[in-house]
Image (cartoon, rainbow, N blue to C red):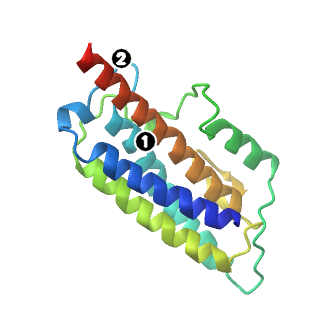
Amino acid sequence: MTTLEQLSQTTRSLYETVVHSFDSLSLVDLNHKPASDSWSMLECLEHLNRYSRYYNPALAKAIAQNSTGNYVQSITYSWLGKKSLEMVRPQNMKKHKTVKHMNPNNSQLTRATLKEFLQHQQELLQLIRDAVKADLSEKAVPVEFFQLLKLRIGEALEFVVAHQERHVQQALRVKQQLAQQAAA
């Protein structure tokens, strides 16, 4: 299985997980916060929405500009790409401070957050399909918080998917904590 196939499979799995795990919950439950400084399930998804609002268009532009017939499907990693991926991998349980405009803490969120997340997943799946025609090793995706730095197309796609995995797992842990509190 290629990396793009793996990313597509993971993205579809995240879509299904969010539909099956959160769609039936009440708005009160979706906004439940285990602690005042932690995020609710919807805040986890809103954080991802904020990143998707930036990275989906940036990836679309990079893929379109680098789909010239010089297809390089293997992903090579820059120092920045390796560091970025290591930070967001779901296995890395270390908390990281997010930049202020990406932090949804204490936001008033509705079911529209879920709908937007699912829409972004559909867009991402299309971007991954489109990336088959692109040079994945091209440094073309500006980093959101410092746009002078650029990620390669392949590593940016992998970063986005790993980041989503990390925060969907966080939302699932919040759901589990809520269930444990209700059972106590």
Question: Is residue 170 positioned above or below 85 on the image?
Answer: above
Please give left or right for residue 3 compared with residue 38 in the image: right
- Seen in the image, is 136 located left or right of residue 113? right
Extreme residue in the bottom direction: 69
Q: Quadrant of residue 10?
A: bottom right
Comes first in the chain, label 2 or label 1:
2
Q: Nearer the viewer, residue 96 or 102?
A: 96
Relative vertical location of residue 47 with respect to residue 148 in this rendering, above or below: above
Label 1 Cα crowd, 10 Å radius (few <14 / some 14-19 / many 20+): many
Q: Which residue is mark 2?
A: 35
Q: Residue 86, can we see it?
A: yes
Q: Is residue 151 left or right of residue 50?
A: right
Dot 2 amino acid type:
Ala
Q: Residues within 10 Å of mark 2 (few under 14, many from 20)?
A: few
**Tag 1 secondary structure:** helix
In the rendered structure, which amino acid carries the disc numbered 1?
A: His
At a point 58% along the width and 76% down the height, the residue shown is: 130
Judge from the rendering whether residue 101 lies leftward or rightward of residue 157; answer left or right: left
Q: Residue at x 72, y 68 (%)?
A: 136
Query: How far apart in space, not on screen, are marks 2 and 1 (Cα)?
Result: 17 Å
Residue 86 pos. (x, y %): 70, 39
Q: Position of residue 113 (x, y in %)?
A: 29, 48
Q: In the orientation shown, which residue stands out farthest toward the front?
A: 183
Query: Which one is closest to the eye, mark 2 or mark 1?
Result: 2
Residue 140, how many percent across, how many down?
69, 65
> Which residue position is annotated with label 1?
47
